[in-house]
Image (cartoon, rainbow, N blue to C red):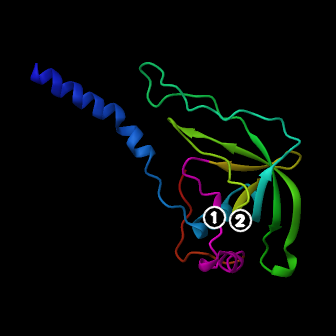
Amino acid sequence: MALRYVLSALAALILHAPSVSALSCAQPDLMQAMETVKVSHKTYYVLVGTFKPDPSAPRSKPNPPPKMTTGVWPPRSSAPAPMQVLFEGYSLTQDRRSDVYLSEFPITVRTSCIGSWCSSPPSFGDQKIAFVQVNPGQPHMLRIAPCSDKIFQVRPQEDPIRRLRSCFDKPCIEDWKPPRH
């Protein structure tokens, strides 16, 4: 009887281990994110400003967390529905005089899930720095994963705008190596 209890507890621990690791996201680093998008084969805008709901976009219900499928871990779910938002701010360039002001700039936000942990769209009204993927002929895309490195809160005391401007044409981080995929 005691052995059965111990084995049951061990099985529960093993089955829930992936859920524990999914909760531990490393704090994303803005300069590392900049380096990652600079070496990507995709093109990104570095946007600084605020997001607001797109009143012309169809209203969608928030995606419920995925349901546990019997015998499958992590649970499988369909991808969350994309959300249309409008951006107000500017596209950051190396020189402040070259920044491009954007008003009511449409962006598609795609969130995703890892197991039962899902990301959420950006909060409205707060100033953000976002790395938005440019898709010629398609809407520009902001992909937000549960442990996202594509959107950051602007913290003026850290002077993030000056730091980003300084590394458009040189490394943001010395000895930085791109992540292996």
Quadrant of residue 77 in the image? top right
Percent x, y of residue 42: 73, 54
Q: Residues within 10 Å of mark 2 (few under 14, many from 20)?
A: some
Q: Residue at x 65, y 69 (%)?
A: 154
Q: Is residue 181 above or below residue 17?
A: below
- Reading the image, the residue beneath label 2 is 127
Percent x, y of residue 155: 62, 72
Mark closest to the chain's N terminus, 2 or 1: 2
Residues 90 and 98: in front is: 90
Residues 8 and 62: in front is: 62
Question: Amino acid type of disc 2?
Answer: Gln
Q: Residues within 10 Å of mark 1 (few under 14, many from 20)?
A: some
**Secondary structure of residue under mark 1:** strand
Q: Is residue 175 visible?
A: yes
Instruction: Report the disc number at residue 153.
Output: 1
Q: Is residue 86 above or below residue 88?
A: above
The range drawn in magenta is 145-168
**Secondary structure of residue under mark 2:** loop
Question: Amino acid type of disc 1?
Answer: Gln
Q: Residue at x 65, y 57 (%)?
A: 150
Q: Residue at x 44, y 47 (%)?
A: 23
Percent x, y of residue 81: 71, 35
Please tell me how many numbered marks the rendered image carries.
2
Q: Is residue 167 magenta?
A: yes
- Kindly indicate whether the residue at mark 1 contacts the one at mark 2 (C-beta within 8 angstroms): yes
Q: Residue at x 63, y 67 (%)?
A: 35
